Amino acid sequence: MSFNRLEADDFVVSADSITAGIFTDSQIPTITTFFTSSTQRTSNSGDYYLNVFSNAATSSLEFAVTYGNELGSGSQAYNLDVDGKSPSSTVYGQYRTLVLGDENADFTFGSITSSDFWAVSMERSRYKESIFPGSTTLLLRGPDGVISLTDNSQVASSVVFNDAGRVFQLVSGSAGTVFTTLESNGYSIDSGSYGLFLPDIATYILNPRALSNDEADGGIGLDATLTSALTATDSPNLNTIFTAITHSNASSFTANSEETITSDFVFVRPRSSQFNYSENPSFISGSTGEVLYSSFINAPTTYITTVGLYNDTNELLAVAKLSKPLEKDFTKEALVRVKLDF
């Protein structure tokens, strides 16, 4: 075994952004069928959110939808004698802490402040690092028709950040292309944008005020009527957004994940005078330590098969295997490139 210290110029770091479909079949970035679990709907968690699957198998969990209201409206109160405390108020508080980082802050869509929202949160294992900005197309259907939503990342003059990372507005458009048939910015000024796109936590915060407008005002007429005491098993607000996403005549959700793969390239350079001898028993006598064959003294030949990377305390950190043995003698030099992805 031979060792050679690596120098600073033997290391090169590279970072590449990799995109892929975000849903179960990553080769297809769009899903058009949606299911829920009756078990989950009737459980305690069904008061807070609905899990959505791309097929009947529970292994195909894609995202969850939920509804948050600052005043606790829209879901059954924990205690009918205590106003404003319900699953919707809990959800609102959770997202406010996650996204805004301030328990006194309000969600703002464009220039409009809202006390409630719908949220679509992607399954964590689906999106890897983030959702690729400009890849989203979400079709929603209401009584007044269908609207296609995308983010404004391709036209935003600057990137806004909050506690959840990057923030973009959801506007009327498709795959990053903003439609301008309503207003020059792709949404109704009177009701704000259609929501917020948070790519770094793979979440869409939808603005009920904008979506509940009729078609003439750029919405789709979703019913956002809230009641403070419900007796139905499911929250109507969860059903409203689930139905809007999954309507059979307009059901399509497209998005890509994005992941930065960092690669550390290590260049190992066996010079002509290096790595020509071996401690393999075929070279050295175990009893005397002499070279067994005289031809190996002046004209040795070795075959490099493995490169080990060690730290300064002689601990093996990584091993690279060559695809085939590399012949080495005094007349040859080599360059072995080791790639470490992390």
Image: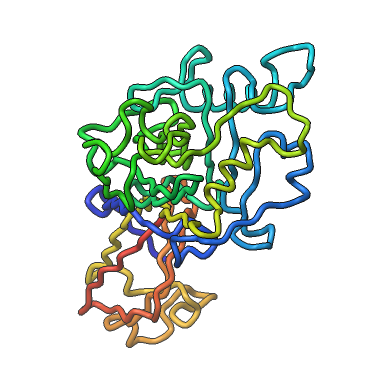
- 108 on left or right of 134: right
Q: Residue at x 79, y 17 (%)?
A: 79
Q: Quadrant of residue 303?
A: bottom left
Which of the image's four quarters has the N terminus? bottom left
Q: Tell me where residue 40 appears, x and y as whole percent.
A: 74, 46
Colour convention: rainbow
Q: Tell me where residue 290 appears, x and y as whole percent.
A: 43, 76
Is 324 located above or below residue 314 in the figure? below
340 or 61: nearer the eye?
61
Is 167 located above or below residue 42 in the figure? above
Q: Quadrant of residue 54?
A: bottom right
Q: Count the marks: how many?
A: 0
Is 102 located above or below residue 331 in the figure? above
- 98 on left or right of 38: left
Q: Residue at x 43, y 37 (%)?
A: 214
Q: Tell me where residue 52 appears, x and y as whole percent.
A: 62, 51
- 28 on left or right of 9: right
Q: Tell me where residue 179 appears, x and y as whole percent.
A: 27, 46
Q: Residue at x 38, y 46 (%)?
A: 149
281 or 339: nearer the eye?
339
Is 330 located above or below residue 55 in the figure? below
25 or 8: nearer the eye?
25
